[in-house]
Structure formats: C-alpha cells, structure tokens
Image (spheres, helix red, strand yellow):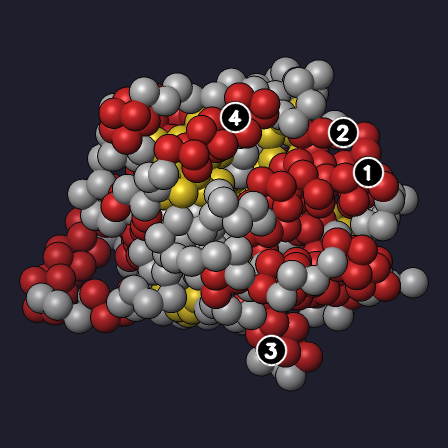
Amino acid sequence: MTLNPNAPSPGSRRRIAAVPALLAVLALTAACSNSSSGSGGGGSASSMTGDCAKYQEYAGHSGTKVTMFASILSPESDNLEKSWAEFSRCTGISISYEGSNDFESQLPVRVAGGNTPDLAIIPQPGLLAQMVKSGKVVKPPAKTVENQNKWSPVWKTYGSVNGTFYAAPMSANMKSLVWYSPKAFKAAGYEVPKTWADLMALSDRIAKAGGPRPWCGGIASGTATGWPATDWLEEVVLGTYGGDVYDQWVGHQVKFSDERIQTAMRTVADWLQNPAWVNGGYGDVKSIATTTFQDAGAPVLTGKCAMLQQASFYEAQWPKGTKVGPDGDVFAFHLPAVNPSIPSPVEGGGEFLAAFSGKPEVQAVQNYLSSTEWASSRVRTATGWVSANQGVDKSLYTDPIDQLSAAALTDPAATFRFDASDLMPAAVGAGQEWKSLTAWFAEGQSIQKTAADIDAAWPQ
C-alpha cells in the first residue's frame, strides 16, 4: 500500500551519525562471525555464531545485492527495512529497496522494458497475474513453498495464478475499520455504533449538531488515485450481500451494472457523498478526490471531522506522539454490516513477494521473507502491521489496533474476503475502476456511467 509520499526518504534518515552507525555495523558483523567465502551466491560459508547463528541457512551469499521494488513509502518503509536489517548484516546480502507512489503503473513498464527488479512486493493478485503472463516471474524455491504451511491455504491461492504458486504472502491488513477520537466521542456523549443503522443515525446526529462533519476522506494516491473508494464499495457489497455475491462480482458473473452493485453504490453515495456529512476539514464531496488518503484523517485530531473509514495500516499516518487506544487520541471500531444478517464481514488486503530472478541470493531473501521468523521481526519493528502467518506469537502484538486486526483476520466466524479490486484483472481493479470511481467523486459522474465504463474494461 502506498504511504506518505512527502516524508523523508529512508536513505536520508541514515546519513545522520554515519561514523557511529558504521562502528555499530562493524561490531555486529564481528560478533556474528559471518565469514562467507561465496561472492556470487554459490560459495561456501563458515558457521555463524552469536546473534547471527539463526541465519546460518541463508549463508553463502556475502557481497551480493538484491533489488526490491514496492509501493510502500516512508514511514512504513523505514520499518520494513529495519525488519530485515539484521538478516542483511549477518548474511552480507544487501537489499536495495525502492518504493514508489506509481508502483502499479511503473512495474509493468519496467518489466516490459527489461528493467525488472529482483523482487517486487505486489499488493494486487490481479497485477501479479499480469506479471506472470509476461513470462518474467520466476517460481519460488522449495523452502518458500514449504513456509506456506504456516498460512491458511486460501492465502496461497491469492499468490497463485491458474493454480500455480508464484508469490508468498508477506502481510495481511484489516480494512473494515472506522477511525475516530474516543476523547471527542466521550465529550459529545456519542457511543460506538454496533449496527449500520446506528452508524448512519450517529452520522446524522453529528451533522445536525453543527460541529465537526461526520466523515472525512481522501482517495488521491498518485497513479493509484481512487483505490480507497474501491474499498468503500467493497465493504458495502460484502456487508450487504455476503461472500457468495462478492465472489461472483470479483469474477464478473455479477457485473457492476447488476442492480445489487448499483444498490451498493447508492449506499456508498448516501454515506460518503452526502454533502451534509463530508469532507470535514477539507471541503465538499469533490474535495475527497483531491485529498490524499494519507492526509484524510488529520481533521479527526483537530476536531473538524468525527470519523474516517480506513485500514489498519493507516495507523502509520498519525503524527508521532499520537496516542492510539480506547482512551487515546484516536482509535478504531469494526465497520458494521449493512445487512445485520451477514456475520461479521471483514475485508482484508495483503502483499505478495514475487521474484523476477532465480539467483541464489534472491531465493535466500525469498525464503527469509516468507518465514515465521521474519514475520515476527516485522511485527516487532512497528505498530500498524499484522500477519496471517499462524506461527507468529500473538503476544508480540502489543498495539491495540494490531490486536483488534489480528483477532478479526483470524476469527473463524467472520465473513472474510480479500480486497475485490486487488483480485480483479489489473486493467479493471487497478485501472478503470480507480479511474471511474475517482470521476464519480470528482465530477459527480452518474452511477450508471461509472458502472458501464468499468464493465466495458473487463478483458474478453
């Protein structure tokens, strides 16, 4: 997922105190005793000791570099790089990471032009399928495949194309959340709504009180502009009709022009295109299209907006020092089902690691990043990140949002579905749907035309 494009790059933060940092690296390297003699991935390696001993199976590739391309930007990418820092120091494999707000459009360009990264973190199974079709994606090594035993089998299907496994899941996120200020709710006498009817009634009550607008939102995200709007529609489709209709919609057996999807779009319009309800702190309905999703929640902290519908990973966007929790500056609650007969609908997303190289050092990184050990390291580096890897000790989740998300993602009673637009063909889910839903918000384009344009983009 794309994050704060205006934040300092990870590299710029590491230029400070270069000498102490170098001494620390040298000390750790000596302690780990990584004296691999292999320079190109196939060499032998002496035994690792100390803190590095746990990376012995990845040894033998010292002095190599693996390039990685993704949509994850600072500050989240800073924590991502921290999660493999010890692995990189101990094995001698340098991971050269690049994040881009234009990842979804740039990856196909790079692949077509022969400028492929060694690895790419792909958040859309539909885009993964497009890359596999190019013939450039390399199947993962046996150890990566074996590591999938720690995941629910459905996640392997998300990383597969036509039944063949290509990309191991790295993360999972909970999208069915509403962010709010517990302090503001308490001061106004508002209670967290348990049903969709209660949520709509609360929105109306807040609007009529004449203070903050009930909702704020933003869908701008570089070339990925529009993706938050797809989430809003998906939440409503899943929460109104359940998993079966949702699955048929993903497969285009149920089209966007179907009356059920049209009804869901009208529900979204009544909710987030209601001029009396949005866009607190920024402007009218159209301002949602020009507000970045990273900035969308800021008015919650300034009292200009009461609620924001966004995923668990949004936690990384709150300013440093923001207290997150039931009695904090911000917290979140589970977005209720539109239809109360649908049991606990949960929309989730995730990211998948695909390789465009079969070099031994690339496979070593694949193996590590598909392991429970890496997932546990990633959990420790920062809040706002969860894994569906069942080997991760739940006690590692100390953040209340992470705990809430992990519980929802592993709830056997929940109606869980992966992000629909990410599952759809890339030309639709990461293309025309983003474009058309943006026009729906930015230009007031009709529901009928919006749906027709998306249906017309579906590959024959």
What residue is disc 3 on? 110
* Residue displayed at 53% across by 21% down: 198
Of marks 4 and 1, which one's residue comes earlier in the chain? 4
Q: For the residues carrying marks 4 and 1, which lies nearer the camera in this image?
A: 4
Q: Quadrant of residue 60?
A: bottom left
Residue at disc 3, secondary structure: helix
> Which badge, 3 or 2, comes first in the chain's sequence?
3
Q: CA distance from mark 3 to mark 2?
A: 39 Å
Circle 1 residue: 260
Q: What residue would you read off at disc 4?
A: 201
Which residue is the site of mark 2?
Answer: 241
Which is in the foreground here, disc 4 or disc 3? 4
Mark 1 and mark 2 in contact (Cβ < 8 Å)? Answer: yes
Q: Is residue 17 visible?
A: yes
Q: Which quarter of the picture shows residue 113?
A: bottom right
Identify which residue is drawn at 45% across, 42% down: 215
